[in-house]
Amino acid sequence: MQGRPRLAVETNLTATQQVAEATAAAGIARFVFASTCSVYGAGGNAILHEDSPLAPTELYAETRVNAERALAGSDPPGLRPTVLRFGTVYGVLAAHPLRPGREPRSPRARCATTRVSILRR
């Protein structure tokens, strides 16, 4: 999606808003949004917390931040959203926590590496 910004916005922001509106119209108040830990940006080796500053470095992450903000602003009204920021489960991981010395190529990969490292402690 990085090379197709219109698709990224339509998929991650517009479609999220449309699903949220349909949810509210159906009389359902709770809405769970699956976001990404990429909203925190590269962040170095810092441990991330829910209230860590948002600093997306990729279009994908930026559209997820915008979707989170739209939901947090009660758009649509009456909806009670819950946002979950998942780490990468598969895909772009260039490094593996069991093979130290190789750095991830993406902020999403760093999230996955950090999560696994914390779980191993």
Image (spheres, grey):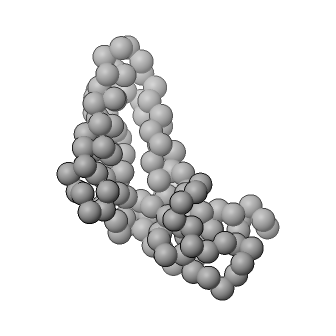
Above-or-below relation of 44 to 72:
below
In the depicted view, which residue is nearer to us: 78 or 7?
Answer: 7
Above-or-below relation of 21 to 58:
above
Horizontal side of 45 relative to 24 (left or right) equals right
- Determine the residue located farthest toward the bottom in the rendered image: 101
Horizontal side of 31 relative to 99 (left or right) equals left
Give the quadrant of residue 87. Answer: bottom right
Horizontal side of 56 relative to 97 (left or right) equals left
In the depicted view, which residue is nearer to us: 47 or 6?
Answer: 6
Point 74% across, 73% down: residue: 98
Q: Position of residue 92 (x, y in %)?
A: 51, 65
**Residue 22 seen:** yes
Point 41% across, 59% down: residue: 39
Point 25% across, 49% down: residue: 7
Numbered label tally: 0
Q: Position of residue 57 (x, y in %)?
A: 35, 69
Q: Position of residue 5 (x, y in %)?
A: 23, 56
Point 49% across, 75% down: residue: 105
Above-or-below relation of 89 to 53:
above
- Determine the residue located farthest toward the top in the rendered image: 27
In the depicted view, which residue is nearer to us: 29 or 60?
Answer: 60
**Quadrant (top left/top right/bottom left/bottom right) for the C terminus:** bottom right
Q: Position of residue 27 (x, y in %)?
A: 38, 14
Give the quadrant of residue 76. Answer: top left
In the depicted view, which residue is nearer to us: 60 or 115?
Answer: 60
- Determine the residue located farthest toward the right in the rendered image: 121
**Quadrant (top left/top right/bottom left/bottom right) for the N terminus:** bottom left
**Residue 48 seen:** no
